[in-house]
Structures are given as structure tokens and as C-alpha cells.
Amino acid sequence: MNGAKAIALGTAALALIGLSACSTDTSDEGATGHNYVTAYGCEPKRGLVPADTNEICGTRVVRSIFAGLVSVDEKGDPHNDLAEDISLEGDRTYHVTLKDGLKFSDGSPLTSHNFVDAWNFAVANDLVSAKFLKPIKGYADSVEKLEGLSVQDDRHFTIELGQPQSDFLLALSYHAYFPMPDSALEDIKAYGENPIGAGPYKLTDWQHESTLTIVPNENYTGEFKPRNDGIKFVMYPKLEAAYADLQADNLDVLDQIPTNLYDTFKQDLDGRGESQPAGVAQYLGINYNSPHFGNTEEGRLRRKAISMAFDRKEISDKILGGVREPATEFTAAVNSGYSADIPGHEFLEFNPERARELWAQADAISPYEGQLKLSFNADADHRPWMEAIANQLRNELKVDAVLNPYPDFKSMISDVAGGSIEGIYRTGWFGDYPSQNNFLTPMFSTGGAGNDELYNSERFDAALADANSKPTVEEANKGYLKSQEILFDDMPLIPTWYGAVAGGYSTKVHDVVFSWNSFPLYYKITKD
């Protein structure tokens, strides 16, 4: 997703009835004297710990209050941030020099140890995004210290990888690689509620399930210095209310426009609406513990049948306003080396006759009986397109497909992560940098940080490792495409659409820019 698990990504409901009654008071000017930019937000699943965050609600805050060696700009290009220099010796050893005089938001010094100690802590304590540190030599689950890390002095340390990885400099921009102060390691739970970072902003207030406020960090000296008084994230129980507040100038920035307004929102917002492709992949996940959907021949046949039984383009055109492009592979079209012609891509095309054949072959192994649940979080508007998929599954496969809404994102992702969710559910991944590897490794490698389906394929892992070892990004991209051929064989997830940002802003703010991965660049926003 980012890399962030994207199951909070949403569109709004088809009907906008009674929106004003749900409006939230987001004004701060009179009460506090601060002219905060108010922005759409949602409740983080965990405390705000960089390596313990892998979902969109936490990611949008973590990436504002923390910083790392490298950052990526709105186009996805890397820039040194806290690093003054990163040089490569041989094919797998990186020498890091930090900028002089770095400090955390509380004024304490930021040194090499804060990177190395944070990374070791993440792995030793099995934090949810710790597996992103897997490229470092000596990585193993719960290992106390990573062999590939060594500190020379306060500004210099060395990272040795277990094998070459062509996109490792880009990977360093992911928040699992962000530093933490010594105090964080003493009580990580308390730290997650009141984090101290080194990013452009710092946390000042968190009213759970309601609002979260960040203000400029006076100790930040990087190139992303805020141009506003701060950001107040407002958490809405329903996305419809957020859109109503945007129209009423009570909300300044919304990065999710209601689906049924895709054709008109730019006109309605009088030039204050934006849409563009984003580095987001959306999928249907299927719990491997569900009967008939395990990592077996029957499970593979059923997943392919479902994939071919619904019409991505028709649903996108009629329900999603044509904004989201149907998926043709397992990552995102904005990624380097993207191809729509990977062998197996035909399983993502609407072919009801072939779908019925595959379903019948699966029934010959073990007949399917009972309902097929389709789960989604109801605090964002997924019902229309999930209902369209359910209808087509009922029509084409004659299966009793039923909707199973969860009240909110947090409750749904808990069941996904815990393995208790039944049947099909919506999921996705927000990229952190435009590389196929940033999708393939977390979502599909054995033990990957986003691999909630517990997909396990030695063949895929070997192909991915081979691609990662290539000396150039161009050669690695070819290997990533080959590894996706294996995913088409197994269909561990069912790609649906590529994400796109469709957002808007109030008349009170200016310089609103949405990045390549759909997040607003909060630091750039100015407010009257």
C-alpha cells in the first residue's frame, strides 16, 4: 500500500441522500487559532510505528511524520532524504552517509544507530512490515540482529544484502526502513500512540475514530518542508459525508470521489477535481482456508473460473465511471517494465463459457455447495461493484454469491489477517515506488508482508529471487514478467482493476497535487 494494504481504498455510494445530516464540523480557525488543512482520513489499525504499518489508514500518517534515507517524488523518482550519500560497493554492499545535524521531532539527535536499531527491533519483534527487510544479509524471522548491518560512526553505516537487488535504493523509501529514537524501543506500544519521527510533520493530537492532527516539525530540514499550519485528518463513518463536506467547503482535501460522480465531479467542483492513473493494484482475495479454494487443483480451477466470469470493463464503465482500467497483470500499469501481454493474461478476460467449463472441472473434483460470500468494508462505497460481480457470478456460474459487508475497514482487515474471513473479499496494494517487485514480493512471496492469503510457491519464490538478482532494472523487469506467468498458473489473487486517484479540494486551498500512488502531497498544500 504503500506498500500499503489497500482494502480501505473506496468509492462512495450511488445515492447521496441525507448527506448534510452526516456532515462533520471540521473547522479549527475559531477554536484554536490554527488554520489547519482538513483532509479525509481513516483510523489506523495499529499504533503509528513505521515497520508495524501495512495499511492505508496508518500509511498516510506515517509517511508524513517519519522520513527515511530515500524519498520518492510525485512521479515516483527517488531522492536522498536523510541520506547525504549512498554508494554501492560491488553488487550488494551499500555505504550510507547521513546528513549532518539530523534530529527527531523532539530535538534528540538522529544517528546511524537509530536506523540499525530500529531495523533489528522490527525483525526481532516480528512487526508486520519487517519482512521488507528481508534483502539484508542474515535476515530470518525473529533474528535478534541482522548480520548485514554495521555502524561505523554516528553518520556512517553499511548495509550488506544477502543477494543483489537492482531496486534496493528505491526499496529504502519504504517506511519499514525509517529510523526510530531509542525511546521507541523501550515501550513500542506507548510509542505508537505518541510517535516521535523525523519527517516533515509531527503528531499533536489523535482522537481515535474521529480526528488526527499533525503540524510542521521544526527540526525537519529536508526538501519536503510543509507550506501550511498542519493537517487535520477527519475520519468519516461514511464516505458520502466526506464528499458533502468537500462540496460545502468544510473539508479541504478528499482523495476518493463518489463513483457515480466520476462523470461530473470535475465540472461540479469547478476545476478543483483531479483524476489520474495511480500505482495501486486491486484484487479479489480468497481465503485459502475456505472449502474448495485451497492451494489445490480444485482451488486453482475455481479462482480462474471466477476471474473469467465477471466483466471488468463493463463494471468499470457502468459503475466506476471508466476511471479505473481493467487489470491485465498482477502489479500496476505505471510500473517500470509493465506488459499487458504476459502469457496467462487471458484469465483476466471476460469469457463466461470458459469460466463455466473450469467451474465444472472443479465440481468434478468436489461439488460446490452452499453460499459464496463476497466481503467488503461498508465505510467506503464498494457495494455497487461488489454487487455487480456477485450478480455475474450468480448468472454465469450458477453459484449462490451473497454480499457480506463489514461495518468498517479495521474489522475487515482484522479478519483477513487472522484468516477467519470466509470466501471472497476485496483487497489491494498501494505501491511505494513504481517497481513490479514492490507488488510481487509483499503480496505473493512466501511470508510476504501483504500475503494474507498465505500463498506459498517455491517456483514463484525462485523466479522472483532470480529477477531480483539481475544487475540492471531492465533485466530484472524481464524476470518479474516471467514470475507473473507462474501467478497466472496459480491465480493466488484475482486482479480486478488498476487504481486511479479521483480527488478534489475546497475553494480554501491551493497547490493540491496527487502523487503517482494516489496520496495527496500534504506538505505542498497552502490554505487561505
Image (tube, rainbow, N blue to C red):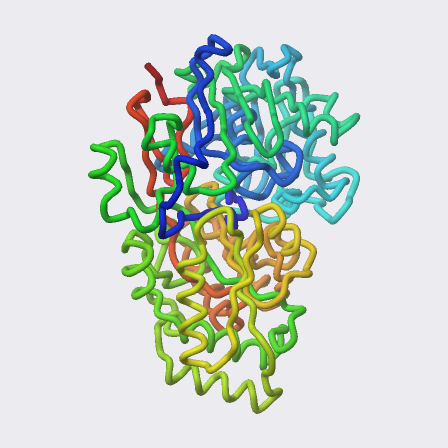
Question: What's the residue at 37%, 85% (across, down)?
Answer: 353
Side of 276 relative to 120 (left or right) = left
Image quadrant occupied by the C terminus: top left
- Seen in the picture, residue 44 relative to 67 is either above or below; the reply is below
324 displayed left or right of 426: left
Q: Quadrant of residue 244?
A: top left
Please say whether residue 10 is visible from this viewpoint: yes
With 278 as the anchor, is 233 left or right in this view?
right
Residue sitting at the far top: 33
- Front residue of 436 and 411: 411
26 is higher (above) or lower (below) than 219: below
> Residue at horizontal 69%, vertical 24%?
113
**How many marks overall?**
0
Residue at figure coordinates x 35%, y 74% from the top left: 350
State the residue in front, 302 or 144: 302
Question: Can residue 517 be seen?
Answer: no
On the image, the x and y values in percent for residue 425 come to 54, 61
Q: Quadrant of residue 73?
A: top left
Q: Nearer the viewer, residue 218 or 436?
A: 218
**Rendering coords of residue 27 (x, y %):** 44, 19
Of 16 and 338, which appears nearest the observer? Answer: 16
The residue sitting at 32% across, 34% down in the picture is 504
**Residue 416 % position (x, y):** 63, 56
Q: Position of residue 448 (x, y in %)?
A: 62, 53
